Amino acid sequence: MKPIQSELKAWMDKNENFKTNYTRIKNEILSDPSVKAFLRDHPELTDHDIEKNLMRLYEYKSQSKQCDRCASFGECQNLMQGYSPVLSMDKNEIRLSYEKCHSRIQVEEQEAQQKLFQSLYMPKEILEAKMSEVIQDNSRISAIGEIISFLEEAKSGLPKKGLYLHGSFGIGKTYLLGAIANELKKRNYSTTLIYMPEFVREIKGSFKDDSFNEKIDFFKKADVLMLDDIGAELQSAWFRDEVLGSVLQYRMMEGLPVFFSSNFDLNELEKELASTRNGVEEVKAGRIIERIKQVSSVVKMSGKNRRDE
Ligand code: ADP
Ligand code: MG
């Protein structure tokens, strides 16, 4: 059998058309500025080496390098979206590999930041709440003061206590929680904000399946946990003691802050927590209140109901 190279040569000689095309493409590849620069850096490459690696050089030439031909990540035209080709030498072989391009790195960083504020069952206005848009009237002064010192302290490490914001319905407690979470995101802290009735539903729903411990862990370990609207939904003694109690206990031991919003002050909340379907259990309710005090500072808010604006 004839060697394949000479077979190919014979075939090419017979096919003038192919040969001209081949030569044209080869010239195009070799005159590409990025290929030229690589070959200039590697004078050791012989014509034979170049011929042998022409496909790689062609692929290199055809791909956008570090976004030089793409307007945005979404418009990336490369074989592997967001990856840029790199030529290198590996024992006299030309190697073509791919590395993440600037846009991909930027998009991944943004996605990672986004994940830092996990909220469950929260409306969009809360997800987008901004500290800079919080209206600073007298009724919020003390809450805002506390929040500002928390955020200041968070610059050098996560404070051990969050806030227990209480006051009547519609005065902006949940909105403030969203705004704090967005500030914490900028400092790379992960926040989990959940509406209490949904928290109860979520945990009860997974009680018998494998995700139960995983979910509890998620609430135990988030940098910052925010429990929105804690109060009347806690008629289950099991949830109060085994779920809420154990999450708060863990966070208290680890010095991880918790934020709460509630229509109840701590005395009223204690009464709510005491009366479950099991009857009145003051000691157990008192234990939860103690833990709440360990993981947060109490702030009373007042003001008008903003829901109808
Ligand atoms: P609460 O949790 O105290 O019941 P919310 O946080 O749900 O009250 O606020 C009630 C309404 O007022 C919501 O629609 C919220 O988006 C709006 N709101 C509250 N505070 C602000 C604020 N500082 N700036 C703009 N809108 C606000
Ligand atoms: Mg609320």
Image (spheres, helix red, strand yellow):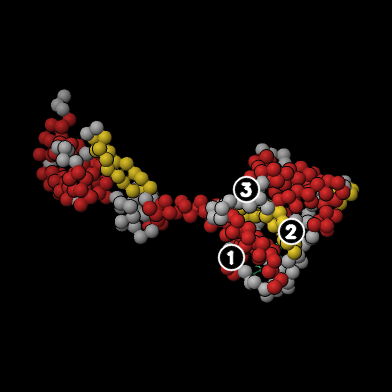
Instruction: Measure the C-alpha gap from mark 2 to mark 1.
Output: 22 Å
Q: Are marks 3 and 2 in contact (CB under 8 Å)?
A: no
Horizontal arrangement in the rendering, residue 48 relative to residue 166 (left or right): left
Mark 1 lies on a secondary structure that is loop
The disc placed on residue 252 is none
Q: Earlier in the sequence, mark 2 or mark 1?
A: 1
Q: Residue at x 38, y 47 (%)?
A: 100
Asked which quadrant contains residue 19, the reply is top left
Mark 2 lies on a secondary structure that is strand
Mark 3 lies on a secondary structure that is loop
Q: Which residue is mark 2?
A: 298
Asked which quadrant contains residue 144, the reply is bottom right
Q: Which residue is mark 3?
A: 222
Asked which quadrant contains residue 127, the reply is bottom right
Q: Which mark lies nearer to you, 2 or 1?
A: 2
Quadrant (top left/top right/bottom left/bottom right) for the N terminus: top left
- On the image, the x and y values in percent for residue 180 come to 61, 60
Q: Nearer the viewer, residue 191 or 143?
A: 143
- On the image, the x and y values in percent for residue 187 come to 54, 55
Q: Earlier in the sequence, mark 3 or mark 1?
A: 1
